[in-house]
Each structure stands twice: as structure tokens, then as C-alpha cells.
Amino acid sequence: FAEAISVAARPSPTAAMTTQCAVRPDGVGVVSLDNAPVNSLASTLIESLKASIAKLVADPAVKAIVVTGKGNFFCGGAEISEFAKLLGPGPGAYKEVHASQPFHDVMDVIDASPKT
């Protein structure tokens, strides 16, 4: 891979849950989910994924984007350690925006990209 760039989200206890972004010489942008052991979708990883995709979409050298997982897993699903954080605000907290909206937003960014 060419230059590897780590796109980290806001600092938090889960700040290590991020993505690595690189552009291969053939113009393929590669985003690697990095949240050991199974690359689960923590809120910081979701924010980092969205930023990485946007960065690669804006790069004219990138012809295509591939999303993969670091290590032996692509993605193990939701980060269950964050479930309690979602329940804390109470039942009325998500009347306007559902707790899973950031996940849907990043999937929309991937879906709308002309390079994925």
C-alpha cells in the first residue's frame, strides 16, 4: 500500500476503534476496520469509516474503494459494550433520531459513493 493514513474520530474511551485508510498504486482506496478482536462497529469506528470514505471519494487518484477488516475478521457487528450507553438516556431519548442513525448514515455514504 502507499501512504497509510489513520482517520480517528473524537477522542473517547473507544478511540482505538478506528479505520486505516490507504491508496494502492493502482488507484484502489482501501479502508480497513480496526477494532480488535472482531472489528465490531463502535461509534468511533463508524465516524472514522464515514470520514475515510469521504476522504477517498474526494481523492481524484482513487478509482475504487474497498472496505475490509484488519486481522481475521471483516466485521463482527455492533459493539455490544456500547449498548448500556444507548439505554442510559431513557426511553424518550430517541424519539427524533434513532440510536442506530449514525450506522445508517455511513451506509448511505457508502451506497451513494461512485467509487464503491
Image (cartoon, rainbow, N blue to C red):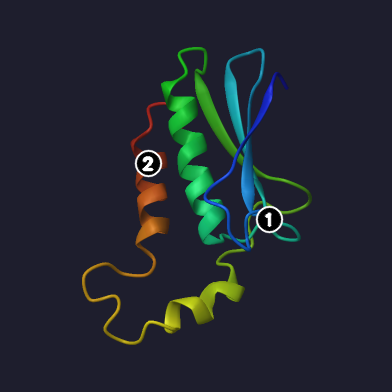
**Distance (Cα) linking label 1 and label 2:** 21 Å
| Residue 101 badge | none
Dot 2: element: helix
Q: Position of residue 30 (x, y in %)?
A: 61, 31
Amino acid type, callout 1: Asn
Q: Which residue is mark 1?
A: 35
The answer to which image quadrant residue 73 occupies is bottom right
Q: Which residue is mark 2?
A: 109
Instruction: Report the side of 89 relative to 7 (left or right).
Output: left
Q: Nearer the viewer, residue 23 or 73?
A: 23
Looking at the image, residue 113 lies above or below residue 19 = above
Q: Earlier in the sequence, mark 1 or mark 2?
A: 1
**CB atoms at circles 1 and 2 under 8 Å apart?**
no
Q: Position of residue 16 (x, y in %)?
A: 68, 53
Badge 2: few (under 14), some or many (20 or more) residues near its Cα, within 10 Å? some
Which residue is at 78% across, 52% downward? 72
Check the picture and name the quadrant holding the N terminus.
Answer: top right
Looking at the image, residue 21 lies above or below residue 101 = above
Between circles 1 and 2, the one closer to the viewer is 1
Which residue is at 58% across, 26% downward? 29
Q: Nearer the viewer, residue 49 or 10?
A: 10
